[in-house]
Image (cartoon, rainbow, N blue to C red):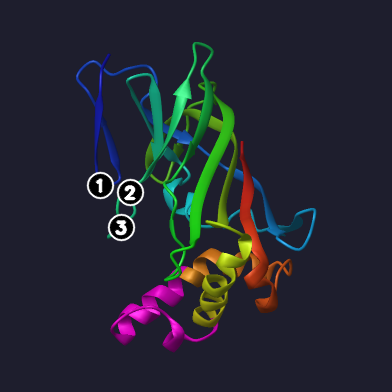
Amino acid sequence: MTTACRFGNEVTPAENPDPITGYYLMRPQRVTLFVKLHTETSSRQGVHPAAQVPSPIGDIISNPAAAIFQDGLVFIGHSVPERQIDWLPTLLDEQLGLTTNGNGSPFIAWEEEKCLRQHFFQGSGLIHQDQSTSINGLNTRGRIELDLTFYHTFAGTETFDDCQTSLQAISECYQNSAACLGETQSEKEQMQTLQRERFEPYVDAGIIDLSDFIQIEAMGYEVSYE
């Protein structure tokens, strides 16, 4: 088993490079947004520009994407200046099939301890080493096909109503930075930017408005790369 290191925006393979590590084309083709409100039995859906995959997947995966093979996993990602480096870990099988499935730890959604937010991701795909090309000055080893779902849930520790105070606070922060958490105006503005990155795609798509925030039970998107 060999390993690889990444410095800045460049993937540097080990002395005996493995057959996977390198750059791959990852072209987003479709992005479908969905929101599940507590008061409704089915999810609302909307479309989003494929070239603007929402955060955080849009922050993690670029085109081309860096793929590093290590310990039976392929780590897909790219460097973003001045931000923490993130990767999407995926299992690799003998046919170059990819499977990813994971979740983050639940944490307090706002200041209400009874309301917890948690994120989940799952997907499957395939590495195609069928055509090498050069893009943005980088030589690729092929392309990665991946259907990926990412979503957040909001859940009360006892009932969903435990989250309404937190979701209302998020709505107010979304509209006015003065209502955001933070000790300084700069911290408040950073918090507002974070909430807008998270919720704005759904508002812009017309599947929720500000009055719906207090009923959001789950929200996320499906993105297909080819």
Horizontal side, residue 211 vs residue 104: left or right: right
Kindly state the secondary structure of the residue where label 2 is placed: loop
Amino acid type indicated by mark 1: Gly
x and y percent of residue 190 in the render? 37, 75
Write down the residue under mark 2: 79
Write down the residue under mark 1: 8
Amino acid type indicated by mark 2: Ser
Viewer-proximal residue among 47 and 209: 209
Question: Looking at the rendering, which quadrant does residue 3 occupy?
Answer: top left
Q: Which residues are magenta?
A: 175-194
x and y percent of residue 48 in the render? 67, 59
Horizontal side, residue 170 vs residue 47: left or right: left
Say few, some or many: other residues with alpha carbon within 10 Å of mark 3 (under 14 / 14 to 19 / 20 or more).
Answer: few
Confirm or deny contact between disc 2 and disc 1 (CB under 8 A): yes
Amino acid type indicated by mark 3: Arg
Write down the residue under mark 3: 83
